Image (cartoon, grey):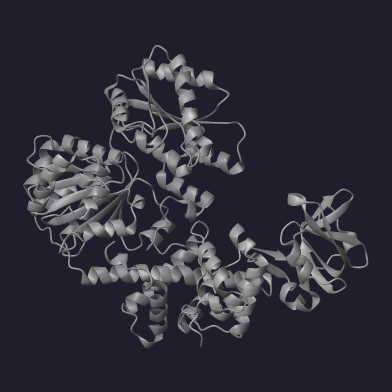
Amino acid sequence: MIDLDKRSITYLSGVGPKKAEILKKEADISSFEDLLYYFPYKYIDRSRFYKVAEVNDTTAFIQLKGRILSFETVGEGRSKRLIARFTDGTGIIELVWFQGINYAKDKHIVGKEYIVFGKPTEFGHSYNIVHPDIDPVEQAGQVAGGLTPYYNTTEKMKKAFLNSRAIQNLQYTLLNLLKWELSETIPTDVLEKTRLISRTEAINNIHFPQSADKLKNAQLRLKFEELFFIQLNILQTAAYRKKKLKGLTFATVGDAFNTFYKKHLPFELTDAQKRVIREIRADMGSGRQMNRLLQGDVGSGKTLVALLSMLLAIDNTYQACMMAPTEILANQHYATVMDFLGDMDVKVALLTGSTKKKERDKLLPAIASGEIDIVIGTHALIEETVVFSSLGLAIVDEQHRFGVEQRAQLWRKNTTIPHVLVMTATPIPRTLAMTLYGDLDVSVIDQLPPGRKPILTLHRYDNKKKELYEFLRKEIRLGRQVYVVYPLIEGSEKLDYKNLEEGFEVFKEVFSEYNVCMVHGRMKALEKDTEMQKFISGEAQILMATTVIEVGVNVPNASVMVIESAERFGLSQLHQLRGRVGRGAEQSYCILVSSYKLSKDTRKRLEIMVNTNNGFEIAEADLRLRGHGDLEGTRQSGMGIDLKIANLAADGQILQYARDIAQQILDEDPDLSHTSHLLLKERLNALFSRKINWGMIS
């Protein structure tokens, strides 16, 4: 049997070195197995043959059987094209090529019978088909057997003659070489329990469906298989880690924790915060290494939970660190922690890319000697020069912004592996959490601190600015402050900057009696901080900004968030921005301003924002609308989430079922050492051995 994973695609008939290179770069296909698992994105029914006489403007795709009567090259330069006159006896239709003219003319013979497939367009008083699929009539069994697959291809692939049809031909060549037989990856008892079809039947029917029902069964089998092995890998890694990795035991709840809890706690903890702290304490006192994901909406009090956890590390003679993705966020955490601690005898240091050399030269030896208890910083924490005396707890904030490997560098700084707390304010849909973080224990803070009122969200069109300005003036008169955010879209920075500049001029004119300040990415750090400070201190009433991070500051007096061109933001981004207000006791508002012309999906997005403040509902809706590939940071190396066929938004039930079956198998046989499970072990190794096992580190 051919080892599909190890056989290079170069050696498949019809590929060769040049095409192999393009397949690798453009479609990540480098082996026979990669090709078989490169699945079609849609299917078109080709079971019917039309007559040329039947063609009209209502036919989407047509299939004809007939002969080419003649070829003619027309036009010059860019408008040069090849026209073939094609007939089936009931009429004549033109076939047109703008590219690959010589190839098309050499390949197709006048008078020979062909099957032609494509989309007819009306041109003058007749119809033509541009760049049709053409096959000799003797290949009818291969191409005209009902549902025809369509594969994603790029411009570079098409230029190298690797269009959808070419990919289909390669699939046919490969399956023929394999005699349409594949070895099984799922044990018989699992197949019987799940009533899934065999791998052979699934792969054959995904590429060459014999019927709509067989295609559906093939998709179900392959989705289950993909999600099942991801879950098996995640669950086995988690179980192995719990069993093998001895964690530091934090047995003491001492002075640091108790003093803070009794004398410095800024407000009564919510029940959700108390529950999460109990879960963290149990983990860190168990003798096992903690790997916990802490989810909580913006403003739910995660930083306070993080600080209490770090004080537990200090009580047990260990250091703690907290890594944030940006300097603004690191500075904010540092300021918050210092404010919480007050005059307590806890040494806290801030280390970012902006830390001056003189300051750094003092800090590094103090961290290495254990003189500093808590280090808060950015990526600077993972530089080789940063050495801890005894790191007991590592906290990573907004972890989807860090690569898996970057986090691993942090844990490697210790001879013993520290406890790990991963925090995110981006609510993660259940299906995504089970796939991205399935090996972590999950805690959720699902309550806002006392005295907070839910934010009221309104949608307004940009032709009704007058009413908006009146509303903002009323809020400012009450002593409140306002954020106005403009979108920042990659690749159009100049345009976005222009939008912000124009908006700034308008707001200065409309609100001439107030102070309006502005921050954006082009400003120098000092300039930005000065402007930001005006808003934080209350000197400026309106802050205008481009990006989400620029406004990542906690200003309890800011009660209104205006989001301009709200249609250009994703749901999760809108929800994050909204969380910047509502931090005081007053009623806060989020106003989504958009143009009147909106697509159905965009209108739906804005409706969801108006109707719910629940971050998890929003994240689920975002996943449904955009798919998992667009969610920030999910396509990371080592994550194992570059899904080929499953869709986390639509296949939640299959995922849960796959996870349950995987868990049952591991409960009976944790190491997959039973004879009946050797097949699973082999497949797991083949799928995941190429990926570095960061799972052992988080």
- Asked if one can make out residue 149 in the rendered structure from this viewpoint, the answer is no
Q: Nearer the viewer, residue 412 or 273?
A: 412
341 relative to 47 in the view: left or right: left
Q: Quadrant of residue 482?
A: top left
Give how far across and how far down residue 291 sits, in percent. Answer: 26, 59
**Which is nearer the eye, 397 or 31?**
31
Q: Residue at x 14, y 54 (%)?
A: 388
- In the image as oriented, which residue stretches furthest toward the front? 76
Residue occupying the point 35% across, 50% down: 401
Q: Position of residue 626 (x, y in %)?
A: 52, 50
Number of marks in picture? 0
Q: Judge from the rendering whether residue 204 lies leftward or rightward of residue 404; answer left or right.
A: right
In this rendering, is residue 242 above or below 285?
below
Residue 680 against residue 277 in the figure, above or below? below
**Residue 409 occupies quadrant:** bottom left
- The residue under the point 56% across, 22% down is 464
Give percent across and percent down for residue 495: 51, 33
- The one nearer the camera, 539 or 168, is 168
344 w.r.t. 586: above or below = below
Please indicate, yes or no, whether residue 442 appears anywhere in the rendered image. Answer: yes
Q: Quadrant of residue 15?
A: bottom right
Q: Relative to 117, is 628 on the left or the right? A: left
Q: Residue furthest top?
A: 513
Residue 422: percent from left, percent from top: 28, 53
Q: Point out the image quarter for the C terminus.
A: bottom left
Nearer to the camera, 667 or 244: 244
